[in-house]
Image (cartoon, rainbow, N blue to C red):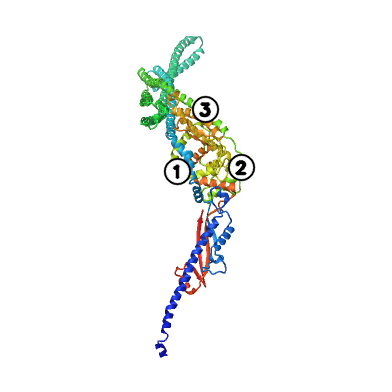
Amino acid sequence: MRNFVRSERGAVSVYLILIIVPIFLFQAVLIDFARIKLAEKETESAVKAATRSVMSAYDKELQAMGLYGLGIPQDETEALFRKVFANNLSGQVSAGAFHYVDTRPVENGMHVTPVYTLASHAIFERQVLEDMKIKAPIEYTLEVTDKFRKSGTKAPFQLGSQFSKEAAEIEKLMDQRESALDEAWLSSEELIEKISKYHTYYQKRISELDQLADQIGIHTADEIRNEIVNVKNQLRSIQDSMRDLDMSIAALSQAGPDGVAGIQALAASKHILSSQAQVFAQKLNELEALLQLIIKYAALLAATKLEVPADGREIQLLQQTIEPALRLAKQRNDEIRTKLNGIAQSSGSGIQGGTSGAYEVFQNVPVMGDDYFYRYQTAVASITSLFTAFEEVINTVYLYTSDNTSRANLANNAYFSESSEFHRQQSVLEKTRMDKYEAMAANKRQQKNKIQAILDQAKQSIGSCSLPNTQSTDTELYNRLQGDTGQAAGERGLYQKYREVNAQDTMVGSEIAYDLEKPEPVSLKAMGMLEAFNNAAESMRNELYVNEFALTKFNYRTYGLEKDPAGQPKLSYELVDPRKHKLANQEAEYLLYGFSSCMANISSAYAEMFAFRMAIRTVEALLDPKKELLGIGSPLLVFLAAAAEGALEAFQDMNKLTNGEAVELSAKITTSALSLTYKDYLRIFLLLHSNNSKLMARMQALIELETGKDLVQETTYIQGNGSSEVRLWFIPQIMKLLDGTGLLGCKVQGNQCQFNSTSAVAY
């Protein structure tokens, strides 16, 4: 054994074995590692190819609308994925032939997961933007933005909008001022009436007290009462004496002839006593009458001292009503003056007034001087003060002597004279003011009536809805779109479904509300649209693409009626034909307003379009206002007169627009010819009322209504997962050792190495 170990024979062979075996092992591992990496790349490519192939099966009907969604069900999707995946693996090619890499699919290792659908607003908007990114800017630039920028409408639009705002603000202040002055004058007339009544009443009372005082003289009630007691005692004594005489006469009469002389003497005495009794009785009556006069005087004096302060409080209450009304009127008058000064400064700097004669009306707005309010308040305060002085005189007078009566009469006449003079002067001013204001109001009512008559005609000309291409009724289709209030709980319309999918509120309808009911609000709201358009027309946003998608893929009232410059019907180059849609000639209006009936949507579009045209025509009229109205001093009257002219012309414009004709924007305020169609105005309104979340939900609802395709099931983003395996040629155990290092990219199971690959594809 020792010799064997120490023997050197075969050393070269052992050395070669020690060298060659590691090299062989290294080559074996390297070959399998290369095959694994090649199989890994092959699997990834196969998964990507399979995923792309699945996505190639898009829905042709949706594709015509510029949208892409997977057009096959999930089971067909899985089958197509498995087929393409397997066919792209080398193990499936030339079966039986030698393959350096014989990758094969793993059963139950292939599946497709849908991730996003067209129901998502983010996905829906991205596809719309992709479809419209070329067409929308060109269309919008050619049809609207370029036209308006070249037409020079911005300044006139701004002028009209600014004038209407300033006219409304000034008129509101004028109305508040006049209302406060009317309230003050109403209370002033009540004050004057009370003053007149009080003067007459107290004049009579002072005279009565003076007469009583003359009759009473310097007597007092106690003195008269004591004297009455004395007179009564004397009268009672005389009466007792007369009774005694009567008894004596009766006794003498029984004495016969001898008592005749005595009887005569007693009768004479009784006669004297009777005369005295009559004198005392008359004096008693006089004293009692004088006492009644004193009592009456005292009662009247006390009543007067109570009545005058009570009446003084009434006058003070009226003063407290008049003065706040005057302060409010003066405050509004000052605000009018401040605003007019601001308008004058803007006009002088050329910001607004220099471009329109209508601004001359602001120079004639009636502004009251501060002296008017000063004299008014001073007169009312003076009347109150003089009545207070009268009250003080009454409180100090107890005996109406000639001097005191004169003082009381002078004080009574003083406040009445002040009141009469105030009424004489102020009534003239107030009548002039109220007559002028009433003339303004009458003129404004006249203009409002003109506008109202045109609005009534416009409401009758809105038209009706018809659904010529379907057997369904308008109500049935809108119930499917918006839901039916009579439906059972849990049921909803398509619009609500897509709002819920995107976690949004499901309220039906729109915050956009245009009507043709009241002349003044309609006119003022119309002018506000011009300012909104000026601000919106400067920007290019994603909303524009979505808006153009709505106008190119869906129909509207005049779809098919509009003509090109050659007089031929405008052609649509879209793959979808909106004329054949179930909701005929009303889809864009529904998208814009979102009401649950054709008439509500069509009427809203008509009303808003009428208002926009009315605003433009009103601006034209403001550029050349009626001179006779400028001197009246009512900016709102000038505006309403212009609005009445504008409403009449707007009504004529609407008849053309609803027949598909293009109407010139304005011959007065544009520097170049500019004509817009019904579609152009819808484009403007979509821009003004941009609300993409509601708009997209309505578009999704319309698409499902028309195509029957549930966009919740229309997949736009999928994730494909595929598993394959490759047989290891050499030493699987060594590959198993490398499995945990992460170098292989597969999992070794027996003599197979399995791969898992994922690919995501979106339209």
**Name of the residue lying farthest toward the left:** 403
Query: What is the x, y in percent for residue 363?
Result: 39, 26
Q: Marks 2/1: CA distance?
A: 37 Å
Q: Which residue is mark 3?
A: 450
* Earlier residue among tags 1 and 3: 3
Q: Which residue is mark 1?
A: 540
Query: What is the x, y in percent for residue 411?
Result: 37, 21
- The residue sitting at 57% across, 52% down in the picture is 59
- Camera-near label (2 vs 1) is 1
Task: Kindly indicate whether the residue at mark 1 contacts the one at mark 2 (C-beta within 8 angstroms).
Answer: no
Viewer-proximal residue among 205 and 582: 582
Query: What is the x, y in percent for residue 160?
Result: 44, 32
Viewer-proximal residue among 221 and 729: 729
Q: Marks 1/3: CA distance?
A: 39 Å
Q: Which residue is mark 2?
A: 475
Viewer-proximal residue among 139 and 252: 139
Question: Can you say whether 28 is above or below 468 in the image?
Answer: below
